[in-house]
Image (spheres, grey):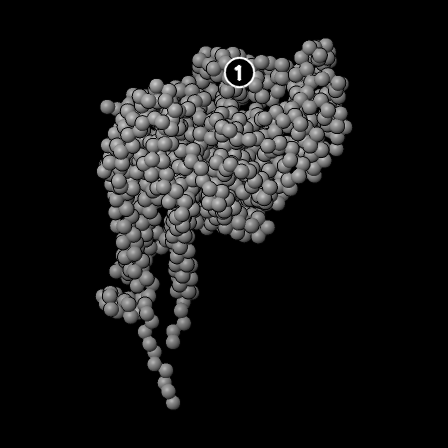
Amino acid sequence: MNIPVQTDSFFERFFRQNFFYFDRYPLVIKIAVLLTLIAVITILVAYSSILLRRFAAYLREKRLHAIHPHIDELLTEYVLLNEDAMMQVPVEEVRLQTEVFLSRQFRKRWQKQALIDRMIHFKKNVTGDISMLLTRVYVETGLDKFSMSKLKKMGWSSKVIGIVELTSMDMTIADVTILPLTNSRNRTLRAEARNAYIKLSKNDPFKFFDVTMEPLLMWNQLELFRTITTTEGLSIPNFARWISYSTNKSIVAFCLKLALHYNQREAIPSIIHLLNTRDHYLRADTINCLGKFMAEDAEEKLVHMYFNQPVNCQIEILKALGRIATGNHLDFLKNEFLRSTDFELRKNAAKSIIRHQALATQMIQELLSNATTENALILKHCMNPLIKY
Amino acid sequence: MEQPTLIEKITHFFESGIFIYGITLLISYSLLAILSLIAILRFQKEDRYVDYNLLITSKIPVGISVIAPAFNEGLTIISNVRSLMNLNYPRYEVIIVNDGSSDDTLEKMIREFELVPVDFAYHKRLNTFPVRKIFRSSNAAYSKLTVVDKVNGKSKADASNAGINAASFPYFLCTDVDCILNKDTLLRLIKPIIDEPRKRVIATGATLRMANSCEMDEGGITRVRVPKRIIPRFQEVEYIRAFVLGKMGWSAINCVPNVSGGLGLFDKDIVIRAGGYDPLSFGEDMELMIRMEAFCCSQKIDYAVRYIPLSLCWTEGPSTVKILRRQRIRWARGLIQLMSQHRRLLFNPFYGRLGLIVMPYNFLFELIAPVIEAVGIIYYIIMIITGNINTPYAIMLLVFVYIYSVMITTLAILWDQITYKTYKSWRETFSLCLMPFFEMLIYHPLVMLFSLRGYFNFITGQKHSWGNMQRQGFSNTPKK
């Protein structure tokens, strides 16, 4: 008969070999001792890390502190104060002494990076020929290749840096390189690639509006809005295309803002059609957009649909009537002001009545003399120029 | 074999219970440390490419109301309001709620900001003490400012509710008028709300720090310093641990229990529907957060509460043991009051993470911890007196607990250093790094005792007086 032999666990063997002093102690104490040791090591590592991080930051700052003035000096002397550029010589023919940017002091990666960062900084603050000259220096010193190499790296963060650098320096990126990145799984990279695509693509910069399935977040909308409205030479499409056909609600909502920004009144019929959407948030955006367009054609429909709407849409309808301000629906606004039980509705009805200015003077006087204390207060609130909202 | 006596059985049960409790607590701290590190590194990586100027120049920004209740703040009110009106954000308003100050707070504001009473349509969505007057400035330079003058409601909650009623925008930032905010606070706090793909972010918060010893100019911080006095310095370490390690860790798994009353950006609609701040609560900020989360669960709203690891707010902390005692007794009362009010949420699966993680954790490791600690110390003393203690084992366990607590706080300081190089000099950083070694010996026992006193006061129904914070104020002259 085989008698099973009791073997030591790894933990017991470990202790016997390394901490023989504690061998006779109970398991709980052994664990405590081991964890104490780990904690001590962690504390030492943590303090070392704090020291090293501070030291590394100090060195980095010191190096940059030394090189930045030098870079600024070179950029000022050879680019900003370039004699040819000042004599209105075409940018392509301006004589540039790029060799000063290729000297030994710009060979290391961190030096190249510092040069790019300062160039981007300068580029943000200049326009016209000087801006184009900076791009020439960037290309002729091969820094564009340095930025481009970041696009080929594995990590999404390197790719984002590469895109930001190239777009900031007004460089074109081939569609074949940038398009796959507009569908990246990483949100930050995807957003940056889309911005770059709109800014740099020569073919169809708004292509991804057709294919994007996921919601366009408010933050991304802000980024895209800025890119679209500030990129020079961008051919602006008719946004009614997406307002009518896109199934992505956030794209539709975004296109409403763009249509409004570019005052595309030809989009108004599509926007009125969108009032039938089931999503009441999108409907509220649509009503808001119509109001800002001062779309008189929509007035009747807005009043007609008013009583079937949730409060957020009702508020937008009241605001829109105030913005359109034809005076055709002043009685409707007055009724809402007097009869609604909702404070916000009454306040917005009052604001819209007041927006009618001369058309509503008599009505306002009448309301002020007959209204309840609270309604009179609402009217006075809306009439007071010191109160903004 | 001899049967164990009843006392031996109780002793064994107690020791095993404490052992399991202690191990769970230590594991959860370790998990929080790991989670917070992941969250911080992720934040840092993504934040590197964010251009916050985008919001400043935006033509489609989200509006924010900044609400700051003020009670007898005559000494500093002007510079504080100026500081709030100088935030970097394109569309916001500042609402100062004068909560029936008995000093010249209101008069000073009227004079300085050329305020005039206006007929303001005040919508009382949340119940508060009566509002006397509402003021707006006749000077266009202060067009952002609204001052609500109300009858003293004996709580910050009541004043905050009045501010919410007067707010015009869909989000509001709640702060204390004496808190010093970073200029980019609104830009930073709105970002997680408008950049969230799936959930509705109902609140965001950021790290608070001690303003004691910091250098100030025109209501803004010009040089961050480690507090010179020992009590605020301990609090600085405590805040770093609570915000950078604790709340960032909880934020990573969407289990944030509390957005601080000193700095928090909230979804106004949810706050109003959840009933606003509770004026009877001693911990009104945490109570509101729990109620908002419970409301979202009951309405099936897929919510999130986010924290960012940046220091955006500086507040003056108690500088003496007496003031600290008053503050901590109130906090402890607030916690026990909250737990008893919302006990139905505890271990209730209907409330998801709130019922199964947030509430149980706060019950077991925040509320009960001081009690268990006190019982443990008494038990320890009895064992020593009766000679039933194995001295080497006891010392080894004590050393372990001590070193472990030092490790957790040190990691919090390291995480903070990773996020932001707050202190300029090595000396300051070093002086902060020393604090974890003394915290457990000096500061922690005090906090434990004050907490127990708070629980005792609550259980025995003793009346609580709010008292005055007795602020030292800040010097405006930067040191040479």
Give the amino acid at mark 1.
Arg
Give the camera-side residue of B238 and B453: B238
Q: Quadrant of the N terminus of chain A?
A: bottom left
Q: Chain of mark 1?
A: B
Q: Quadrant of the C terminus of chain A?
A: top right
The structure residue drawn at horizontal position 23% and vertical position 38%, both measured from the top left corner, is: A104
Query: In screen coordinates, is A268 left or right of A194?
Result: right
Query: Can see residue A245?
Result: yes
- B371 up-or-down from B11: above or below: above
Residue B279 drawn at (x, y percent): 53, 32
The structure residue drawn at horizontal position 29% and vertical position 26%, both measured from the top left corner, is: A78
The structure residue drawn at horizontal position 56% and vertical position 50%, both measured from the top left corner, is: B352
Query: In screen coordinates, is B435 left or right of B293?
Result: left
- A58 up-or-down from B14: above or below: above
Badge 1 local density, few (<14 within 10 Å), some, or many (20+)?
many
User: Which element type, helix, strand or loop, lies under badge 1?
Assistant: strand
Residue B385 drawn at (x, y percent): 29, 56
Query: Can see residue B335?
Result: no
**Which residue matches tag 1?**
B136
Give the number of marks: 1
- A358 up-or-down from A4: above or below: above
Res. A10 image quadrant:
bottom left
Residue B412 drawn at (x, y percent): 35, 44
Give the camera-side residue of B27 and A261: A261
The structure residue drawn at horizontal position 45% and vertical position 11%, both measured from the top left corner, is: B111
Residue A163 drawn at (x, y percent): 43, 40
Give the camera-side residue of B109 and A111: A111
Res. A300 image quadrant:
top right
